[in-house]
Image (spheres, coloured by chain):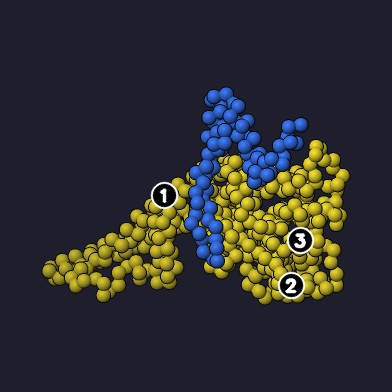
Chain colours: A blue, B yellow
Amino acid sequence: MASNAAVPFWRAAGMTYITYSNICANLVRNCLKEPHKSEAINREKVHFSVAKWVDGKPQKSSNYPFIFLFC
Amino acid sequence: MAMTALRREGKRVSTLISSPNLRSSLAPSEEQVSFGVRSISTQIVRNRMKSVKSIQKITKAMKMVAASKLRAIQVRAENSRGLWQPFTALLGDTPSMFFNNTSVLKSTYYIFMILFACFLPKEYSVLLLNCQDYLLISLYSPCLKRKIGSYIFKLHHCDALTVGVDVKKNVIVTISSDKGLCGGINSTSVKMSRALHKLNAGPDKEGKYVILGEKAKAQLIRDSKKDIEISITELQKNPLNYTQVSVLADDILKNVEFDALRIVFNKFQSVVSYLPTTATILSPEVVEKEAEAGGKLGDLDSYEIEGGETKSEVLQNLTEFQFSCVLFNAVLENACSEQGARMSAMDSSSRNAGDMLDRLTLSYNRTRQASITTELIEIISGASALTG
């Protein structure tokens, strides 16, 4: 039962279940054969910008031109 | 670019049309005409006609674009409904704590509320109402129901007819669009969020906003910028996908402390209609507490948990995953209703432009004819003066 052993590890590494499952999903995507692989990876582009607010003012916003590079 | 030009032009034309002395503003008045010029210049009207015509072209094009985007996104939105439905079946949308204290006190509250709803402006009546209240009101008076009917918001899951779980830290996730020109969908979701915020306000309670999209940010900045926690924009640069929304959900989970997340969005119904909707996600601790108290969540104990995980671990994973799924659906539904609303808004605005063009053409032709007639009269009378 590999997944059982893994649970505390990713949680301890500060990941949420979402990050964990995203990494897993990305691994699966990387296992595809070529025409499908790049298609699937291109489909899942992440882009948005986040601004945290402190005392009614937006702090500097950070962009997420974020393509999964976990593996 | 085109959008701002359009907005500017639209403002100009709308003031022109709404002004009562339309005719006089189109035909230059006496003092504007310089001495010696006999015919009235139709230049202004011609220019206006040209601009209205190009606005009509733009709005028609925008309608087409919205229609094609809608078709693409509608399928995805409808498919994504399968993501939250199992969660709602398992956890319910809102565990009903309000039901426990339905009492005489409550019914006097309703009578007050109905009186209130009669006299308050529309924006406020939404503050007082939720689905349960609506049902009661419709029992009390069917004609009131008609009056308030359109300001009711629907809960994601109708078994749990209440907005209220009594928790301390409420975080309201308002979903809106980045771009405008799409009717009232952004202001409905903002109104709903404000209503939820008021509904959950209390002395020892805390209400925060997480805002998705430029438009809701612009509206909420005015009166509740102290309560904004995070704002997120530019979500729709690429086509929406689950990875993106889940990274976003992850970000929200990491940066915001919450007991209950309330996602406010417009649920897509058809091209011309959308329902302002809220979905609730409780934090794992609250779910556990609720489950111990019994009710729908008490059934959780009847599930067998595989492996060495504890119940709280499972619940935490479940909540996180539920949040990302519900958020994904909410974002898609909202994008879908946005395109639908934009389509119908652009449709009616191109129809308006057509009407305006008709009116302008009429007054243009009338002026033209009048000047021709005047010229003819002048020529004939001059000729008859010479012969006579």
Q: How far apart are marks 2 and 1 (CA)?
A: 47 Å
* Sequence order check, earlier mark of 2 and 3: 2
Does residue B385 lie above or below A50 as drawn?
Answer: below
* Amino acid on which disc 3 is placed: Val
Closer to the camera, B282 or B317? B317
Closer to the camera, B200 or B112? B200
* Amino acid on which disc 2 is placed: Met
* Amino acid on which disc 1 is placed: Lys
Element type at marker 3? loop
Circles 2 and 3 on the same subunit: yes
Judge left or right: residue B116 versus residue B249.
right
Tag shown at residue B57: 1
Residue A17 in percent (x, y) is at: 68, 43
Tag shown at residue B113: 2
Closer to the camera, A51 or B388? A51
Residue A32 in percent (x, y) is at: 59, 26
Q: Distance between the residues labelled 2 and 3?
A: 20 Å
Q: How crowded is mark 2: few (under 14 residues within 10 Å), some or many (20 or more)?
A: some
* Sequence order check, earlier mark of 2 and 1: 1
What residue sits 74% from the left and 72% below the top?
Answer: B114
What residue sits 66% from the left and 64% below the top?
Answer: B207
- Give the letter of the chain under mark 2: B
What residue sits 66% from the left and 55% below the top?
Answer: B263
- Give the letter of the chain under mark 1: B
Residue contact between numbered discs 2 and 1, judged by CB atoms under 8 Å: no
